[in-house]
Image: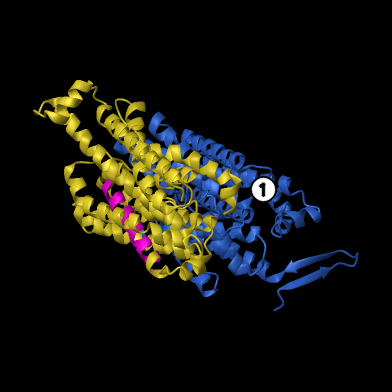
Amino acid sequence: MKSNRAIRTPGGLSVRLDVRALTAVVLLVLAALTASVLLIGTGDFPISAGEVLRTLAGQGDAGQEFIVNELRLPRVLVGLLVGASLGLGGALFQAISRNPLGSPDVLGLSQGATAGALTMIVLFSASSEQITLGALTGGLVTGAAIYLLAWKRGVHGYRLVLVGIGVSAVVTAVNGYLLTKSDIIDAAQAVVWMTGSLDGRDWNQVWPLLGLCAVLVPLVLANSRGLRMMEMGDDVSYALGVRVERVRMLLMVSAVLLTASATAAAGPVGFVALTAPQLARRLTRSPGPNLLASLCMGATLLVTADFVSQRVFGAGQLPVGVVTGVLGGAYLLWLLVAERRAGRI
Amino acid sequence: MLPRRRAVRAFGLLLSVVLLVCVAGASIAIGAKDLTLGQVWHGLFEDSGTYGDTVVADRVSRTLLGLLVGAALGLAGAVLQALTRNPLADPGLLGINAGASAAVVTAITFFGVTSLSGYVWFAFCGAAAIGALVWFLGGSRAATPVRLALAGTAISAALYGYLQAIMILDDAALGKMRFWTVGSLAAGDTSTIVQVLPFLLAGSALALLLARPLNAMAMGDDTARALGANLNRTRALSMLTATVLCGAATAACGPIVFVGLMVPHVVRSFTGPDQRWILPYAAVLSPVLLLGADVIGRVVARPAELQVGIVTAIIGGPVFILLVRRRRTAQL
């Protein structure tokens, strides 16, 4: 199968179509939807996949309708949206920092959001809305701090990464301090939040996240051409007509917003942002940032991880972040082996 | 080297020792309980078991632990920076402390090891395994500062995820470990010191002996080989030294970041690149930083205290960012 095809219209317009990438995206969307249906059916009150579909179409009995529409659907939607935002945010960060490890959870954004949430939990014993707000603020402030501190006549990949690591270490220390200051009940709540969990998420979390994605995803995809050219280096992209610093700033802000709001909704679910873009790239086998595929991969990964954690450990026993953490560790090992085999080590 | 310059450096080292003695004195005199200098003197030299004397005795063992651990972290940082030819190497940043922490927590939770002398061996294994893993993941010989730091941070993040999973599953572990994982000298008592002392002394001696071979390695592999240095032996011994020092230090007080990063940089700015001066200076000045941070932590949050690991991270983070922003370092 030829991986690239050009479609020409009679009017003289032509579009290049990457068949393999498109197939991958379609398959990922299907996988995400399948996992979502299975996840809705999983829990203390199991529902078969057929009945889930029927209930979603509005033909279930009242009990099933309540469980599906009010309890489990919003949770799954939050999972899909958080996964998609993390996947896209991670792809943007990795493209901007030009490093497969340069993801928001390594660069301190997740830790910043955690600091905001912990401040709310420990110092104010806040409600879940206030925790969400605190996490959002923490993430945005940390993102702005990293960007400004890395700025020196433009932002370069390595400086962004290293400044991010420095900020991350400081914020981690602050988190540790907040955790030691809290009493044991707050601390237990805080640790669950810090791992990233989808338990108890409802429609209140879905709508803001959906709105933000509806604005940011088209904006980011519209700028992906510039990002792709920037992979050839800043000078070349200037020569090709990309306003590098402007595009970079726009995409950074979008990535920070996506990551911070995802973290605010579900806690810092580890390693989705790190692994999703890499897996997507391997699946599509096409160069460039693979934004759309990363987005779908992130959503699939998160919902599948939640499904695994519910099935293996029982409903509500272990938060989804533990499963993604294990997956992330496995990914790092695999990266080690793959790089070594490719002779890059 | 000019004899005069050598004299200046020796004098500087003497001054550093004096500074260390002053900071150690402050660490004994300052704390949550206000003591007069007379009471401190009484506790140190005429111990008769009063309440003040007990406080002084506690602070003395805490200060001793700070001295030992500070010197260990500084030496480990200096050795790692020389070994990897990487100005941003630090036992904390490279994930070695996180590896030791994860191993210790595993030992406590799953193997029921409770004594420090039992789990210090786990700490060594964890430190060595993670050190090697980061080195490979960062690209071994082709490692750049950015790649190594990223590999270290990513692996630390994975290990902290593992620690969190343990803390979620086990409330008792949470109660104990949330204090240990920030890095604190508060647990220091005589038995802790006695148990880690042999490892820290051996590691420090080994580090100081490595000064000459590390100097040769700084000139590049080919030149070093031509000068008669045994590269593989030096690399292996350096890794062993760093592992023993970091493992023992982490087992005693939990992971403490940035001490091993900052001090060698400060030292290099006035000694130049000669390891025979950098290592002794780092061994003397790192405890100054660690004890200073500990005293600050006791003063700012009275009557509670900030753990020393938090203070060093809050001081060290900005220093690290400053180093990154400085052009020369970033190009290395």
Colour blue belongs to chain: A
Q: Residue at x 43, y 46 (%)?
A: B3
Disc 1 marks which residue?
A251
Query: Going by the image, does B10 lie left or right of A224?
Result: left
| Label 1 residue SS | helix
Mark 1 residue type? Leu
Seen as rendered, the residue at the extreme right is: A11
* Color encoding of the figure: by chain
Q: Work out whether B233 lies above or below B67.
A: below
Colour yellow belongs to chain: B
- Residue A200 or residue A70, whichever sits in front: A200
- Is residue A107 something one can see in this rendering? yes
Q: Work out whether A215 lies above or below B297.
A: below
Label 1 environment density (alpha carbons within 10 Å; few <14, some 14–19, many ≥20): many
Q: Work out whether B6 lies above or below A44.
A: above
* Residue A175, percent from left and from top: 41, 40
- Residue A60 lies in magenta, yes or no? no
Q: Residue at x 75, y 67 (%)?
A: A17
User: Quadrant location of the N terminus of chain A?
Assistant: bottom right
Name the subunit of mark 1. Answer: A
The magenta segment is B235-254
- Is residue B161 something one can see in this rendering? no
Query: Going by the image, does A108 lie left or right of A249?
Result: left
